[in-house]
Image: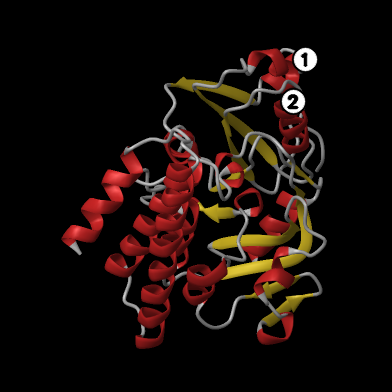
Amino acid sequence: MTGHDGGQEEWRAQVAVILPFYQRKAGLLLRAVRSALAQRDCRVHVIVVDDGSPQDPMQDLRDLSASDMAQVRLLRQANGGPGAARNTGIQAVPPEIPFIAFLDTDDQWAEDHLARAIRAFEAGADFYFTDYVPLGSDKSTFELCGLSLENHARLAPDLFRYQGDIFAALLRRAPVGTSTVVYRKSACGAERFPTEFSYGEDVMFWMRLTRGRTVLFSPVKAATYGAGVNIAASARWGNPSNLNKLYSEYRFHLAVAKEFPLTAEQQRWSENYRKGLRSAFLANLIHLSIRLKRFSLRPVLGFARLLLTA
């Protein structure tokens, strides 16, 4: 049944939707929450986690109706990054809700996204994701990652079981976008986003959630990605923040190599990729120093410690 007025309708499932909030622009959160509340065939419980945002989320949420606000819970915490905010949301999910979905506050869903996810869970999924078009790209993520439908088991016209090693895909270029993920809480309830690095915490989470579990996906582009605050995307060459991104990415790949058993080929790829990150970090550091640009010493000292202890 459709609708979200809190009545006595029969829902196929209940889904907790977690939105970490850190924005400077009004209106984005309202659109994201409305796209969650508009989902068909399920009862959504929206959990907004204010991660010390400069923009007050209530400036958006106050425009919701009273019946819509009955399905929204607002939590507040000091800034800890999106991983920590999502963990706070996961911890707050009521025990009777079986499924958890993620939606970034600058993104929106098609109104049948969760209905499709529920069909995937009815088909045995523990973890579900869909295709999407990254902001500024003319190709979808599946195209960019080389995910070919012919290599996977078709269960329905728009539903596939992932065949092969999804870890290998996540390691090199993840086909999984955060705002498309829905997972079964009972299969993955103890897992949380790592918070020790600011790059790749979502990919590490997907690696953990999909290990030994049934993964289904859809080629339907269910999420529209927006242009809100994206610290990682803004960390480009010549920008002081790029040092922190490269340092965090290096730490991520080190952590993956320690936690997961890599094949010999994956070990070689990881070592070569980390070598490239070291070279890029040094080049960025020299570039910034020559141009007398100010930058934080934290990633420089952190990178030096990692290299000395390797």
| Residue 229 image position (x, y, % from top left) | 63, 34
Residue 306 vertical position relative to residue 107 in the rendered view, above or below: below
- What residue is disc 2 on? 30
Which residue is labeled 1 in the image?
63
- Residue 110, horizontal then vertical, whole percent: 81, 47
Q: Amino acid at mark 1?
A: Asp
Query: Residues at badges 2 and 1 in contact (C-beta under 8 Å)?
Result: yes
Is 27 located above or below residue 95 in the figure? Answer: above
Q: Quick check: 146 left or right of 261?
A: right
Residue nearer the viewer, 56 or 273? 273
Q: Please rate how many residues cluster around mark 1, counting C-alpha atoms within 10 Å: few if below 14, some from 14 to 19, many from 20.
A: few
Q: Secondary structure at mark 2?
A: helix
- The quadrant holding residue 127 is bottom right
Which comes before the other along the chain, label 2 or label 1?
Answer: 2
Can see residue 199? no
For image coordinates 63% across by 26% down, the residue present is: 23
Q: Residue 305 at x, y = what percent?
A: 21, 52
The quadrant of the rendering that contains the C terminus is bottom left
Looking at the rendered structure, the kind of residue marked 2 is Leu
Q: Is residue 16 visible?
A: yes
Q: Which element type, helix, strand or loop, lies under badge 1?
A: loop
Question: Distance between the Cα atoms at labels 2 and 1?
Answer: 8 Å
Q: Is 84 situated left or right of 218 in this image?
A: left
